[in-house]
Image (cartoon, rainbow, N blue to C red):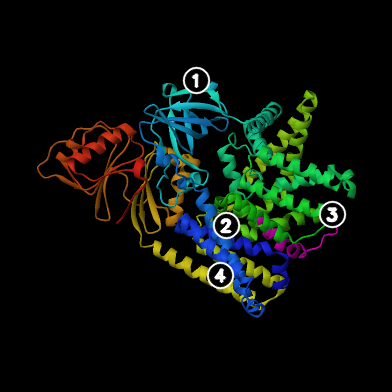
């Protein structure tokens, strides 16, 4: 497709790039709103003045005027980021809250049961202090202790409490997930744990009938699936597949789907909306005449958006709903537009609504997958021709999977640090099977009032889910099914994307410039990765991780490490993968049991390290034993004042297995004795470069 023709058919692509540039710059540079407003006014005035200059000059400055328009869109993107950042609100709880305040908050979603508590998202309504009410804004996470009082809590309930809010923090472990930023993008900045006597339920309720109706529908769907589909794994997957409810999903099963490259089946995405859209198009075929085309469009869009809201209105599904809305309007108007323009328009609208969706992994992967399929599917599908319809169907599925991987692989490597080798095999079975399961679940909900028929459909659906789960888990056990441990930077990700796109364009159009671009990008990627890997051979580090209620220490030498800590972390894949594994991927290290860590007092690269986790008596010594790093873990009975009679301590580290009350006592002792103390639970991982 000629470049000029492409830009003419897809003008929103340019506008989208400008908006994204403004969003990214504002997030990293944090311009003031007054500066952005002044800049927007200056650009707007310049654009208006352009129309009053002579035609001869206007023609020569046409490119400059177009550039000014893009700058204006970029500035508006920055303003959107500023407005959506809750921290810029004058009534943000982080600015108005003091420790003695009473907090009045409304629960905005049904409670979710966790292992030791119930979790709920709440929005702050007011602060009460010294017999006065103060306005305050912000979302907080409430954790309620499990007891009978929680049963009366539900969506819309207002609660009041006087317990201090805690700011949401990251674990501080190297390479770990930025949970603080993730929460901030949703307007959530604080959390609090509440026991029975630490809150009161107010008589007033703050709810809307529409949200209540959506929650009731979700609850009914979940109850219906649990009634007719048996097995915890099967129920959890059925709920996630149909409405995106993930709280009942088995964590190990999710890891299996991730490792085999079909986790997109669990996440409500474009594939689900495409299936629903296709079903609606089929069911409304009697209304396809010109007289009823608008009625048909209204029915389809109402059903699509109802499903979108029922699925929780996640970024990926909203993106698909907006895209199909644009397509439906185009068909109703009998106009065919560029699919790239439609995609760019939908992304532009979504980012204008919530610019922070730009950092949403699902948003990135869903757009990358669709663009990749649109751009490369036909070229890949034309590689082979199968006259047999069954063979052709499987080849189409494989071609779609191959096309989607071109742009999603670099993004997946950046976020998840792994590549599922068997993605073709898993997708060729799981995608059609999951589509059949989705239609079966819709049918089950439609006929659930007929108990006998519901039991038959539910049993059949549960069996299909069991077969799919078993197939995925079987493939995950294949030794070479997963390549893991990839650690690439954002710039390296961009280089990989350029390499993949340029190579595909060269294969399709045979343009030598694209081949050169691909090879240069690949060369830069290889050079940068080689430099980063080579640098890892010189690293010598001690890392004490922040893993709540666990002790975890890595001693790193070059590209090897030795682990000291709780053996439970070796068997609990979920906790280890979430808290510890990202650091090992970042440092590109593999286990090496040859390092001397069998005792609790050892020397590591001329640094004397001691670990104390049991109560013991310390004999005062005239010549104190020098210790560079003393790690306190578990809950031993000891006093810092006794330790310094025996040891000459340079640094004390309190790891995350120590109870909070004990850690606070030790920190107070260290402060009074002028000994450097590092609390891992409070400050994040303790990292020392040796």
Question: Circle 2 sits on which residue?
Answer: 411
* In this view, 224 is above or below 182: above
What main secondary structure does the magenta stretch of the protein show?
helix
Q: The magenta stretch spans which residues?
A: 369-391
Q: Label 2 vs label 3: CA separation?
A: 34 Å
Q: Counting residues from the N terminus, which is met first, the one under dot 2 or under dot 3?
A: 3
- Rendering quarter of residue 245: top right
- Rendered residue at 21%/34% (across/down): 639
Q: Which residue is mark 3?
A: 389
Marks 2 and 1 sit apart, C-alpha to C-alpha, by 45 Å
Q: CA distance from mark 1 to mark 4?
A: 60 Å
Q: Kindly report the distance in space between the C-alpha atoms of the residues bearing marks 3 and 4.
A: 38 Å
The quadrant where residue 163 appears? top left
Give residue 262's position: percent from left, percent from top: 64, 48
| Depth check, front residue: 612 or 189 | 189
Compare marks 3 and 1 and give the one earlier in the sequence: 1
Residue behind mark 1: 149
């Amino acid at each position: 497709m000629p470049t000029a023709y492409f830009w003419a058919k897809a003008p929103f692509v340019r506008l989208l790039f400008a908006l994204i540039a403004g969003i990214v710059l504002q997030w990293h540079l944090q311009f003031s709103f007054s500066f952005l407003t002044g800049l927007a006014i200056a650009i707007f005035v310049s654009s208006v003045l352009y129309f009053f200059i002579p035609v001869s000059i206007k023609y020569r400055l046409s490119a400059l005027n177009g550039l000014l328009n893009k700058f204006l869109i970029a500035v508006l993107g920055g303003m959107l980021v500023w407005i959506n950042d809750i921290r810029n609100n004058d009534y943000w709880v982080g600015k108005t809250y003091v420790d003695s305040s009473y907090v009045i908050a409304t629960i905005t979603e049904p409670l979710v049961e966790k292992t030791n508590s119930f979790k709920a998202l709440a929005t702050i309504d007011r602060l009460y202090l010294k017999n006065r009410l103060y306005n305050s804004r912000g979302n907080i996470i409430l954790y309620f202790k499990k007891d009978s009082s929680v049963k009366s809590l539900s969506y819309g309930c207002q609660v009041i409490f006087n317990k201090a809010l805690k700011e949401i923090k990251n674990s501080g472990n190297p390479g770990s997930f930025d949970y603080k930023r993730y929460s901030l993008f949703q307007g959530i900045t604080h959390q609090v744990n509440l026991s029975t006597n630490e809150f009161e339920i107010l008589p007033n309720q703050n709810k809307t009938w529409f949200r209540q109706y959506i929650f009731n529908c979700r609850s009914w769907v979940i109850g219906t699936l649990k009634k007719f589909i048996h097995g915890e794994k099967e129920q959890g997957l059925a709920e996630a597949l149909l409405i995106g409810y993930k709280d009942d999903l088995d964590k190990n099963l999710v890891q299996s789907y991730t490792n085999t490259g079909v986790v997109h089946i669990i996440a409500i995405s474009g594939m689900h909306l495409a299936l629903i859209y296709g079903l609606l198009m089929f069911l409304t075929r009697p209304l396809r005449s010109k007289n009823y085309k608008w009625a048909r469009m209204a029915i389809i869009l109402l059903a699509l958006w109802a499903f979108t809201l029922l699925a929780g209105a996640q970024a990926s599904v909203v993106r698909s709903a907006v895209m199909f809305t644009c397509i439906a309007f185009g068909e109703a108007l009998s106009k065919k537009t560029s699919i790239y323009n439609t995609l760019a328009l939908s992304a532009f609208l979504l980012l204008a609504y919530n610019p922070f969706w730009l950092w949403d992994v699902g948003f990135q992967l869903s757009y990358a997958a669709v663009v990749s399929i649109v751009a490369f599917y036909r070229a890949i599908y034309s590689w082979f021709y199968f006259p047999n319809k069954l063979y052709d169907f499987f080849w189409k599925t494989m071609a779609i999977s191959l096309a989607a991987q071109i742009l999603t692989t670099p993004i997946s490597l950046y976020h998840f640090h792994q590549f599922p080798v068997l993605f073709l095999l898993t997708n060729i079975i799981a995608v059609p099977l999951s589509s059949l399961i989705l239609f079966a679940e819709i049918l089950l909900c439609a006929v659930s009032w007929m108990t006998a028929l519901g039991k038959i459909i539910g049993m059949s659906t549960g069996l299909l889910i069991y077969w799919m789960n078993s197939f995925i888990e079987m493939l995950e056990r294949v030794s070479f099914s997963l390549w893991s441990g990839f650690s690439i930077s954002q710039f390296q990700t961009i280089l990989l994307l350029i390499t993949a796109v340029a190579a595909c364009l060269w294969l399709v159009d045979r343009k030598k410039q694209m081949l050169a671009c691909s090879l240069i990008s690949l060369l830069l990627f290889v050079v940068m990765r080689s430099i980063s890997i080579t640098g890892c051979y010189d690293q010598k580090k001690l890392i004490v991780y922040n893993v709540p209620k666990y002790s975890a220490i890595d001693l790193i030498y070059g590209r090897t490490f030795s682990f000291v800590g709780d053996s439970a972390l070796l068997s609990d894949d979920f906790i280890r993968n979430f808290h510890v594994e990202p650091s090992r991927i970042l440092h590109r290290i593999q286990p090496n049991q040859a390092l001397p860590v069998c005792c609790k007092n050892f020397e590591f690269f001329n640094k004397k390290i001691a670990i104390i986790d049991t109560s013991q008596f310390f004999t005062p010594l005239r010549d104190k034993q020098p210790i560079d790093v003393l790690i306190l873990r578990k809950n031993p009975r000891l006093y810092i004042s006794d330790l310094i009679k025996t040891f000459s301590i340079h640094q004390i580290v309190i790891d995350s297995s120590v109870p909070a009350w004990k850690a606070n006592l030790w920190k107070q002792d260290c402060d009074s004795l002028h000994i450097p103390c590092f609390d891992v639970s409070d400050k994040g991982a303790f990292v020392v470069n040796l």
